[in-house]
Image (cartoon, coloured by chain):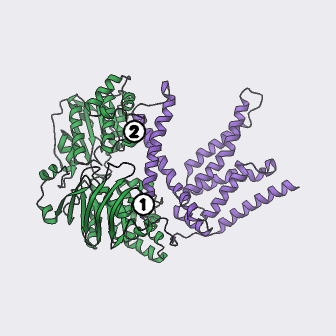
Chain colours: A green, B purple
Amino acid sequence: MTELKDVSFSYAAAPEKGCIKHMDLTVPDGQFLLLTGGSGCGKSTVIRLLNGLVPHFFEGELSGDVLIDGRSVPKMELYETAAMQGTVFQNPRAQFFTVDTTGELAFGCENQGLPEEEILSRIDRTVERFRIADLMDRNIFAMSGGEKQKIACASVDTAQPPLILLDEPSANLDYASTMQLREIIKLWKAEGRTIIAAEHRLFYLWDIADRALLIRDGSIAEDWSRADMDSMTNEKLAEYGLRSIHDTDPVTIELSCSRSEVFSVKPHKKFTFPTEIPLHEITAVVGRNGAGKTTFLRHMCRSAKRSRRIFMVMQDVDHQLFTDSVLEEVLISLPDEDEEKAREILRSLDLEDYADRHPMSLSGGQKQRVAIACAAASGRDILLFDEPTSGLDYEHMQQTAQLFRQLREQGRTILVVTHDSELIEACCTDIIRLE
Amino acid sequence: MIKLDPRTKLLLLLAEAIVVLGGLGGSSAEPFKTVFMVLPFLLLFSAKKVRTAVIGGLLLGLGLAAEFIPAGHSCSIILLMCSGILTRFVPSIMMGNYVMSSTKVSEFTAAMERMHVTQKITIPMAVMFRFFPTVKEECSAIGEAMKMRDIRFGGSKVLQMAEYRLVPMMTCSVKIGEELSAAALTRGLGSPVKRTNVCRIGFHAADIVMFLLCAAALGWIIWRSVT
């Protein structure tokens, strides 16, 4: 049994964000519990309380007790907790200790000092169950996000912990990889493991979870049983600020517009990419993993380099904010530095209050908006976005959709590579499928 | 492919640093200096890192060629300096590259355990293996984003360029470093239990050859300096 007893916690670094207030929670063995809620509501903090990172790694004010099988996590050392739980984190790039996959699968068991034969047989078992023989003995740096996340799950599996924790594991995954993650979780559930997942993409977990909690401002706002979950509708969830539970594969969405004016793209040497992009529309670019979505964006950038009409916002915003203030960031994007104009753009995107903040001190959704502001400031008329909503909750996703509509009204053309069917439904006017 | 024990690789790295980078023994160590200049390239080829070996080879060749340019020219001092830096540093960097790219993290920790080095030293060093490729990945992503936003060298932005590149790189590296340690800790790193290690390491013929080579170099240098 896993319990939280009147737990309150606030981070020393940022007391307001992600804090927990007097939370009581009991999770019986074998239950699959889904934690959901907006960004910064405290759902990740619950995961960290259970794996001991709070308070041992992320320091702060803690009261109450967290128990796994009657043992207090805050009182245990991290390595003791390690034997009782396994955690899959959000960022596939930053949860590996080794560089090769086989070493990674052995890592948790090695730390527990298990005998060598035992570890090797466990690895074989996991490889067979997860069907990942083709991923063994490979360099993790050369793998896709979906493959990395599979390895992360496999390395949790080899340690065979009774409690499995997932902290937004699908945030960087496309539709197909997300569905593979779902299969792995089903496997664990069938084995009777206790699973606690913090997620805001609900569609792939909603029908297999036993119970769901809505967390708001660090407290449990709603506690839904399986029966409650079955009678839930998307409209009702939207009122709670939650994402859709319907499993819509973006590839199957139908949209079309008149395409009266188009931008022509040169044909690609290897791929047969579409050569016409409708102007003044918001076009979604969808396709399976490896269909060449990112290659298509790169190709567009390259073929229109001379005309300087295209601006691209990449998936990881941390890589594309360089300066020490939001205002400066917009200023260097403008063709000629004009502070009045920069402030006007910030005002139109609700960012004026943050003008003097350091971009890196903002939240994920705010950074995303700054990146969009830079795109708007660039003065180019075709804006490309690569997975802009992958880590965003419902509210921020809607905000992004609103921004796109605004940019379109200003006469710009938007092309967005995405696997987020809700974003497509919220704002896109045309769709391009890559085979 | 020649497979060396991580301990042998560390010894080679040390020998490389002493003979080529440090220049111990001066001109009397010349024959061994040549051997140690060529050795990293052979090892890189054996590890199929052809591109790195060719680039390094070109740089080293440039450095060696610069020595033959007649003196007396106004910039010959600068040339000589560049040549000295290239011929001293390139072989050691190549050896470092070979050691980093051909050693698995678990092999490295196993070797350190065999040498009875404490975890306090082994773990941070093991993290380095993981960290360099991460920083490289971050760096190229940032470079690409800068190109996209038309931030290039030149004009009035030369100084800012360095800042623009370093700031996101540092924040990203710190963030990833933090996430990496958090993930490793939840998986029991740092436990006082004796760690198992599933990879097998040990000395083979190639290791013995390398040991003999290093011993011979050391013996030669000592013998030449006393006589």
Which chain is indicated by disc 1? Answer: A
- Give the quadrant of the N terminus of chain A: bottom left
Please state which of residues B44 and B118 is positioned toward the viewer in this rendering: B118
Q: Earlier in the sequence, mark 2 or mark 1?
A: 1
Left or right of A433, for residue A296: right
Residue A129 x/y as whole percent? 33, 70
Do the residues at discs 2 and 1 belong to one chain?
yes
The quadrant in which residue A398 appears is top left
Instruction: Identify whether A114 is placed above or below B104.
Output: below
The quadrant in which residue A73 appears is bottom left
Residue with the mark numbered 1: A56
Left or right of B179, for residue B26: right
- The amino acid type found where label 1 is placed reads His
The quadrant in which residue B151 appears is top left
Residue with the mark numbered 2: A320
Residue B170 x/y as whole percent? 47, 44
Disc 1 packing (10 Å; few <14; some 14–19; many ≥20)? some
